[in-house]
Amino acid sequence: MRILLLVESFNSLSQRVYAELSRDGHELTVEFDVHEDATRQGVGLCAPDVIIAPYLKRAIPRDLWSRYPCLIVHPGIPGDRGPSALDWAILEGQGEWGVTILQANDELDGGDIWAFEMFPMRLAPKGSLYRHEVTEAAVSALRRALAAYADGTLRPIGQRDVAYSHIVRGRPHPPMTQAERGIDWQIDTTATVLRKIYASDGAPGVRDRLCGHTVTLYGAWPEATLRGIPGALIGRRDGALCRATVDGAVWITHAQDARGGGRGLKLPATMVIEAAAIPARPIGWEPQSLPTWQEIRCEQEGAVCHIHFAFHNGAMSTDQCRRLADAYRAMRDTDARVIVLHGGPDYWSNGIHLHCIEAADSPADESWRNIGAMDDLVLEILGNDRQLTIAALSGNAAAGGVFLALAADAIFARRGVILNPHYKNMGNLYGSEYWTYLLPRRLDAQERARLRAGRLPVDTATAVAIGLIDAAFGCSSTEFMDGIARLARAWSAPHFWRARMTEKVAIRARDEAQRPLAEYRAEELTQMRRNFYGFDRSYHVARHRFVYKTPHGHTPLYLAPHRRRHPPERHEASRP
């Protein structure tokens, strides 16, 4: 079928739906809902069989849903309504939740049900649930709905139909307000604080007061040992602040200056709040026996070292790159034969830290420092002649994060991970991380050009098929982690390790003789210097729009073949 994705932005769920349905054989195109007239125009140009809205903030106009089947992906169980569905489920401690595929009508979230999928709830941030359970359930439910529609067996069910009485019934929920999200540090327990911040993860955050400033809080981790007066800041570590509760403490990893309507940048908490007087609470890389905030964690199991680096949203600042390189060097000096780079459960890496760059006195200078630190980290991995390195992608990766993974000797990913192995969406950024050396090791010139020019998300099945990664397995993070542990042990077996190391060292020596890595880096950075310091400000404009979440003013043509098929004068709103 010809399917139009109508979206507010091309977020992680939209990308997964796009990649999966495209691989199923459907013809996919994307329209950004920038204005009702532009949406009508885009739909007219596409003439879709079905419109799917995986991420939409406005109601679809009546004249569209009355002419086309319009499916809303609602992150709630049948009967649930409202824009804060997942927020309320977390705050209320629901044990089971789901995703419902609704047919749009004139009642918000009130249309007939085409399919739904249930899942058990984890105690986790909203963004993590969204990128895992919600996304998996949405893809499964959409596939069933489309299959039934295509073969004529679809029988949409009204939301009040008795057929759904055997499951937990949802109810209409109003938008969750800041008053309902707000924390009372003199009353709320650690569990309550965690739920409130988890329910507000990503957006809109929790409005609060810290050191006399109105801020918005994001990212929370439990702290098992530190104690203090409820509400007091009692520690700082790796950009995070520890705040006491009535029965313990929590770490707040990120904050946003809420003055001026909350237009401040979301940054590591210690960049928003003056933290010099707050006690430092440093820890090493070793796993902690009790819960605490630990951004980089290393552990050795026999001949295998595991390095976990759960950087917020996958962004890697200059400091984070340097600390990760330090950890990698430390593990390289052990007697291990294999090092596994795990990243975080939601994002493996998305490359340089655009928020920290935007906040710098000179964004160009900080961009230069950040890309240099990323390059140094990649070089550490490429230059390791003592261990084999495995990149284990349990979460999504994009831009420089994909090429950081390519520096490893093998890349394995959880099924369902989405890769965006390109830089051009960020103001035509050229990119570094030795990609001009690493990508040709895996893809031919035609495939490389297609990836860079297309700028489209790549699912793991496609990535394996073209050779971008080595394998994908595990439907859940737990299954994937278990598989990685077994695989890493097998790689560390002396006979296997010796053979692979011999081959690796020989190939690296041959490649270095043909063209030194330093030349690849110098050539890439020549292009990057133009991006950062040149007359073309596209990168700086794109970065600014990205970090401040500026609404799209048009549908990018690389996502919209329905607009590319028609002369520009016929669709003025699509011009870049």
Image (cartoon, rainbow, N blue to C red):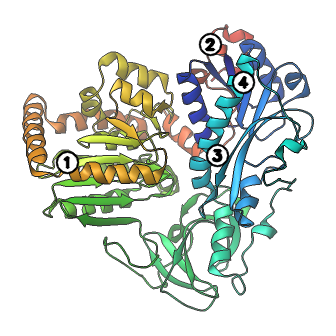
Image coordinates for residue 312, horizontal then vertical, percent: 50, 57
Q: CA distance from mark 2 to mark 4?
A: 31 Å
Answer whether labels 1 and 3 touch (C-beta < 8 Å): no
- Which of pointers 2 and 4 indicates the residue nearer the eye? 4
Answer whether labels 3 and 2 touch (C-beta < 8 Å): no
Image coordinates for residue 142, horizontal then vertical, percent: 67, 32
Q: Is 117 displayed left or right of 319 in the figure?
A: right
Residue 340 visible? The answer is yes
Give the residue type at disc 4: Ala
Which quadrant, please, contains the N terminus? top right
Q: Any mark on residue 491, and which? A: 1
- Which of pointers 4 and 3 indicates the residue nearer the eye? 4
Q: CA distance from mark 2 to mark 1?
A: 47 Å
Image coordinates for residue 208, horizontal then vertical, percent: 70, 73
- Which of pointers 2 and 1 indicates the residue nearer the eye? 1
Judging by the rendered image, the residue that carries numbered circle 4 is: 148
Judging by the rendered image, the residue that carries numbered circle 2 is: 564
Q: Is 86 displayed left or right of 419 in the figure?
A: right
Q: CA distance from mark 1 to mark 3?
A: 43 Å
| Rendering quarter of residue 561 | top right
Judging by the rendered image, the residue that carries numbered circle 3 is: 549
Q: Nearer the viewer, residue 193 or 426?
A: 193
